[in-house]
Image (tube, rainbow, N blue to C red):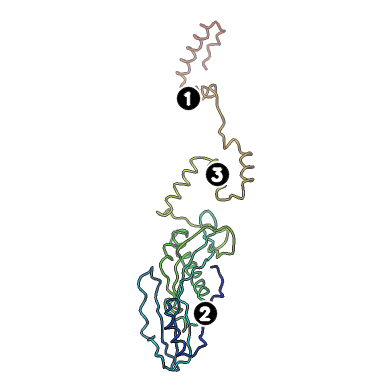
């Protein structure tokens, strides 16, 4: 499911209250709750509240919402969807590599049907998404004050546990963060040109080691890393590689260059000794002997 807000979690029943009560009891459904309101403004709940089973036992029915009586006098009856929903929020995380486009996979559900009716929360995802946006902005500011960056590990650490929207009767949690390519997203950085602070935390130690190894391997490794992050720039990377061949392939040296470099490191005394040895050897070969000047 995407950002479609058309799915209603709150629907007003059209049947008579007693008929709605009987129909709900006979259906024995666990995917929907029924909330009834009497003339004095009191609410009654037929069904359950709480979290999905994976988070433990369902929360107890609130004391202010007892079970309705079949022949009670009620002025309104509402059906509340208890299904666990999954939606996606596109976000641009401000990382040291630039803005990283990701999809936050969000699970949300009704934990208190009575509060849903009281708050008139008709579209659950609209309410959850608004709260999620605020939570992400708050988290970004908190990470900035602490001098640390905001990435997928931080988002999962803070938002993977159920987040309560008590007034609306809803809960949600982020259960996955995935890279995305394009699409509308919530940008959390101040501006595109803002520098992002970085923190060498335990979560980023692997990133540090990877970057260090890439730098040690030289320009070729960095070019490959850039191409990995920007696969659409193959032609630009190839053009750069052709224009900077000397960086990618260090200049070769022959034995003369190596010998000259070695002689340059000798002391004057060592040069004189080697010069004498060379003159003697050249003379033994029958070649003209250079002057007495040392090398």
Give the image location of residue 134, x and y in percent.
49, 70
- Circle 3 packing at 10 Å, graded few (<14), some (14-19), many (20+), is some
Q: What residue do we see at 40% from left, 54% from top?
A: 202
Q: What residue do we see at 50% from left, 78% from top?
A: 9
Q: Is residue 278 above or below residue 166?
A: above
Proximity of marks 1 and 2: CB atoms separated by less than 8 Å: no
The first of marks 1 and 3 along the sequence is 3
The first of marks 1 and 2 along the sequence is 2
The first of marks 2 and 3 along the sequence is 2
Residue named by callout 3: 224
- Circle 2 packing at 10 Å, graded few (<14), some (14-19), many (20+), is some
Label 3: element kind: helix
| Residue 265 circle label | 1
Proximity of marks 2 and 3: CB atoms separated by less than 8 Å: no
- Circle 1 packing at 10 Å, graded few (<14), some (14-19), many (20+), is few
Q: Is residue 179 above or below residue 26?
A: above
Q: Is residue 112 left or right of residue 223?
A: left
Q: Is residue 20 above or below residue 193?
A: below
Q: Is residue 203 above or below residue 288?
A: below
Give the image location of residue 129, x and y in percent.
51, 71
Give the image location of residue 86, x and y in percent.
49, 68
| Residue 122 circle label | 2
Quadrant in the picture for residue 111:
bottom left
Quadrant in the picture for residue 48:
bottom left
Label 1: element kind: loop
| Residue 184 circle label | none
Give the image location of residue 284, x and y in percent.
51, 6
Instruction: Give the alpha-carbon distance from disc 2 to disc 3, as whole Å.
Output: 50 Å
């Amino acid at each position: 499911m995407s950002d479609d807000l058309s799915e209603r979690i709150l629907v007003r029943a059209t049947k008579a209250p007693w008929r709605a009560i009987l129909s709900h009891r006979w259906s024995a459904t666990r995917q929907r709750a029924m909330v009834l309101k009497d003339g004095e403004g009191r609410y009654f709940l037929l069904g359950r509240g709480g979290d999905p089973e994976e988070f433990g036992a369902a929360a107890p029915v609130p004391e202010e919402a007892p079970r309705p009586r079949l022949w009670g006098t009620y002025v309104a009856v509402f059906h509340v969807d208890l299904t666990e929903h999954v939606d996606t929020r596109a976000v641009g995380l401000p990382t040291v590599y630039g803005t990283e486009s990701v999809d936050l996979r969000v699970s949300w559900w009704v934990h208190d049907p009575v509060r849903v009716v009281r708050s008139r929360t008709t579209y659950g995802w609209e309410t959850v998404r608004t709260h999620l946006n605020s939570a992400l902005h708050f988290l970004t500011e908190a990470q900035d004050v602490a001098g640390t960056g905001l990435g997928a590990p931080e988002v999962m650490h803070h938002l993977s546990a159920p987040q309560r929207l008590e007034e609306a009767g809803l809960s949600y949690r982020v259960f996955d963060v995935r890279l995305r390519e394009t699409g509308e997203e919530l940008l959390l950085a101040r501006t595109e040109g803002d520098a992002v602070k970085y923190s060498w935390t335990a979560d980023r130690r692997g990133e540090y080691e990877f970057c260090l190894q890439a730098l040690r391997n030289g320009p070729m490794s960095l070019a490959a890393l850039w191409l990995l992050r920007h696969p659409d720039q193959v032609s630009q990377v190839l053009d750069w590689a052709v224009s900077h061949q000397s960086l990618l392939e260090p200049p070769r040296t022959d034995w003369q260059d190596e010998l000259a470099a070695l002689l340059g490191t000798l002391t004057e005394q060592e040069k004189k000794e080697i010069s004498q040895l060379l003159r003697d050897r050249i003379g033994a070969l029958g070649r003209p002997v250079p002057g007495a000047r040392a090398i």
